[in-house]
Image (cartoon, rainbow, N blue to C red):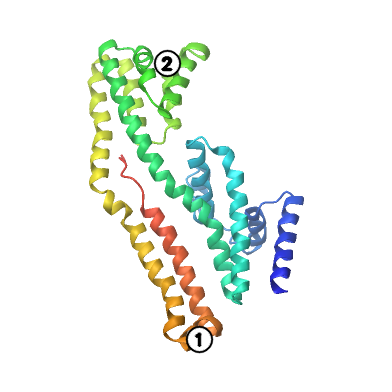
């Protein structure tokens, strides 16, 4: 009966949000607004004017997920991701209710709902490595052609067929803009910078714009491209350390969750104390909270080596 009531309540809440065209974030913001400290310091006002306020927590995770999906050309999948997240939220709540552990409802509901976003963030690591590899090849061949021809349009046209997606699409757009929309090459180069999230690429574009004003600077492009090679070499050497947090998390997770059924066979009294008593339910809730916090931290630490200015 309790499970049916919980399903009905969650259905009522989700239906109300859909009918009122509200998102859970907007609702939570509206509820918490009267309790916030509205007084801002001068420093906070300056930062808000300059748009330097960094996003934190759930907002940051959702913004990063949106950016990753846009970068990989899967922006339309975000709605499916939200539906999956809401389904897992309900599943987590129902699982807690089936265990008769009301304290664990918010922990499992929130933790399960974040799993799709964490998965996208983790798989973006492999996409980023592939992007850096393609970017290294593309910038190398284009730079060599530019050193010979001293024309970026000629260099891109000569090598566009040898560049693989997604880098190829970016340079195709560059050629289309310069030929069909605006002949201002410097403006087209500036528009390239936000299309690939890579500091070395942006530095290469800045160097290319400087070379158009002074041809003697063209030999500065090759050292910039070589930074991508250095990143690949360092990344290969540190690959084990990069995935070490995830490996350690999986090992500790198996030990933690494996102890619960093991306790059932070793000592039934301990198992009943852990699962059915209020103290045991609190311990299980704390353990699951630590699991989800650790998972988020492990995914945050597992990222490829990148060059930063």
Quadrant in the picture for the C terminus: top left
Q: Where residue 183 sits: x, y (%)?
A: 47, 12
Q: How many marks?
A: 2
Residue position for label 1: 273
Q: Is residue 31 above or below residue 55?
A: below
Q: CA distance from mark 1 to mark 2?
A: 72 Å
Say whether residue 226 is left or right of residue 5: left
Residue displayed at 36% across by 57% down: 246
Q: Where residue 274 sits: x, y (%)?
A: 49, 82
Q: Residues within 10 Å of mark 1 (few under 14, many from 20)?
A: few
Q: Is residue 59 above or below residue 145?
A: below
Residue displayed at 32% across by 16% down: 213
Q: Are marks 1 and 2 in contact (CB under 8 Å)?
A: no
Q: Where residue 75 sits: x, y (%)?
A: 55, 38
Q: Residue 277: which quarter of the image?
A: bottom right
Q: Residue extending furthest bottom? A: 269
**Residue 238 visible in this rendered orientation of the protein:** yes
Residue displayed at 41% across by 76% down: 259
Residue position for label 2: 185
Q: Residues within 10 Å of mark 2 (few under 14, many from 20)?
A: some
């Amino acid at each position: 009966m309790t499970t049916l009531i919980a399903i009905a309540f969650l259905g009522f809440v989700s239906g109300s949000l859909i009918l009122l065209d509200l998102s859970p974030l907007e609702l939570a913001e509206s509820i918490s607004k009267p309790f916030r400290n509205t007084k801002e310091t001068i420093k906070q006002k300056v930062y808000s004017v300059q748009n330097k306020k960094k996003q934190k927590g759930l907002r940051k995770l959702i913004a990063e997920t949106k950016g990753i999906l846009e970068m990989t050309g899967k922006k339309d999948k975000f709605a499916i991701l939200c539906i999956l997240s809401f389904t897992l939220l309900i599943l987590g709540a129902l699982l807690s209710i089936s265990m008769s552990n009301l304290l664990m409802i918010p922990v499992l509901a929130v933790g399960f709902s974040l799993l799709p976003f964490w998965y996208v963030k983790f798989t973006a690591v492999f996409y980023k490595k592939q992007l850096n590899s393609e970017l290294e090849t593309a910038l190398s061949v284009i730079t060599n052609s530019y050193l010979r021809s001293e024309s970026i349009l000629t260099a891109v046209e000569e090598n566009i067929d040898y560049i693989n997606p997604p880098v190829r699409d970016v340079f195709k757009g560059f050629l289309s803009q310069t030929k069909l929309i605006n002949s201002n090459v410097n403006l087209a180069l500036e528009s390239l910078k936000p299309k690939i999230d890579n500091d070395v690429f942006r530095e290469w574009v800045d160097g290319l714009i400087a070379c158009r004003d002074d041809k003697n600077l063209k030999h500065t492009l090759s050292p910039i491209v070589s930074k991508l090679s250095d990143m690949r070499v360092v990344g290969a050497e540190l690959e084990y350390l990069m995935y070490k947090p995830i490996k350690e998390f999986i090992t500790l997770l198996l030990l933690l969750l494996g102890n619960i059924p093991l306790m059932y066979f070793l000592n039934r009294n301990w198992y009943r104390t852990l699962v059915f008593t209020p103290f045991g339910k609190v311990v299980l809730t704390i353990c699951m909270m630590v699991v989800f916090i650790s998972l988020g931290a492990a995914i945050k630490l597992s990222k490829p080596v990148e060059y930063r200015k």
